[in-house]
Amino acid sequence: MSDDVIEAGVQGAPAAAAEVKVWDPVVRLFHWLVVTGCILNLFILEEGHLAHQVTGYVVAGALAVRVVWGFIGSRYARFADFFPTPARLSAYLGAMLRGEQPRMLGHNPLASLMMLTLMCLLGATALTGWMQTLDMFWGVRLIRHLHGFFANGIMVLAFLHAAAGLFESWLHRENLIWSMVTGRKRA
C-alpha cells in the first residue's frame, strides 16, 4: 500500500498517543463548506431560488479550490498521495476480506474512491444547476432531471460516507469526524 499505513487489524490506541497534523485548513474548510452547502440545498433552501443558487456557487468555488489544492497542497491533500489505483484498491480490499483492515493517516483507497466520486457529482450538480440559468437550457427537462439525479447521488453517497467514517472510527478507536475539525489524528 503506502507508507501511511499505521497498523493492521483492530488494535487499541496507545495510552498517551501522539498526534500528527493530517488535514490542513483548506481540506477541512472544503469538507465543511460542502457538508453545509449540501444540507442547505438538499433539505432547507427552496430549489431554484437565489439562496439555493448562491449556495451552489459557493460549493462550486470550493470544489475548484480543492481541485487545485489536490495538486499543490499539503501531503495528505494531494491526489497523488491517495489516488485509488487498482493496485491500492485490491491490496486494501484483500486486507479487509482477511479482517486486517489497516489504519491509515490519510485517505484509505475506498475513502479516496468515495471522495473523488463525490467531487465529480458535486461538479456535475453545479454544472447542471448553472446550465438551468442559461437561456439555452431554460426549462430543459433533461438538465433538470440530471441535476436532481446528481444531487440525490450526493445525498446517498454522503450518508454512506458518514456511516463508513463512523465505522472506521469504531474499528480503529479514533474519532475521524473530530479529526476533520482539528486536522489532527493519532500518530
Image (cartoon, grey):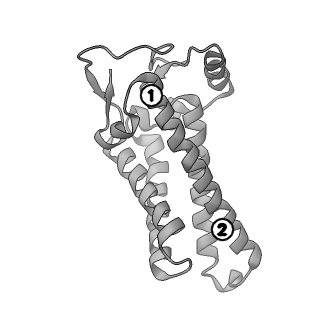
Amino acid type, callout 2: His
Numbered circle sitting on residue 70: none
Q: Earlier in the sequence, mark 1 or mark 2?
A: 2
Find residue 35 and report its horizontal and vertical position in percent: 45, 55
Nearer to us in this view, 23 or 43: 43
User: Splitting the image into 4 quarters, where does residue 47 fall?
Assistant: bottom right
Q: Which residue is mark 1?
A: 170
Find residue 43 and report its horizontal and vertical position in percent: 51, 67
Label 1 element class: helix
Q: Residue at x 71, y 72 (%)?
A: 143
Circle 1 or circle 2, nearest the eye: 1
Amino acid type, callout 1: Trp
Nearer to us in this view, 41 or 108: 41
In this rendering, position of residue 184 left or right of residue 150: left
Q: How many labels were placed on the picture? A: 2
Q: Is residue 104 above or below residue 31?
A: above
Q: Residue at x 53, y 40 (%)?
A: 163
For the residues bearing labels 1 and 2, Cβ distance under 8 angstroms: no
Quadrant where the image shows the C terminus: top left
User: Splitting the image into 4 quarters, where does residue 170 fall?
Assistant: top left
Q: Residue at x 61, y 62 (%)?
A: 151
Q: CA distance from mark 1 to mark 2?
A: 35 Å
Residue farthest to the left, as pictured = 16
Residue farthest to the right, as pictured = 142
Within-10-Å neighbours for mark 2: few <14, some 14–19, many 20+: many
Find residue 81 and report its horizontal and vertical position in percent: 49, 30
In this rendering, position of residue 32 left or right of residue 125: left
Within-10-Å neighbours for mark 1: few <14, some 14–19, many 20+: few
Numbered circle sitting on residue 147: 2
Q: Is residue 36 above or below residue 95?
A: below
Find residue 121 and report its horizontal and vertical position in percent: 62, 55
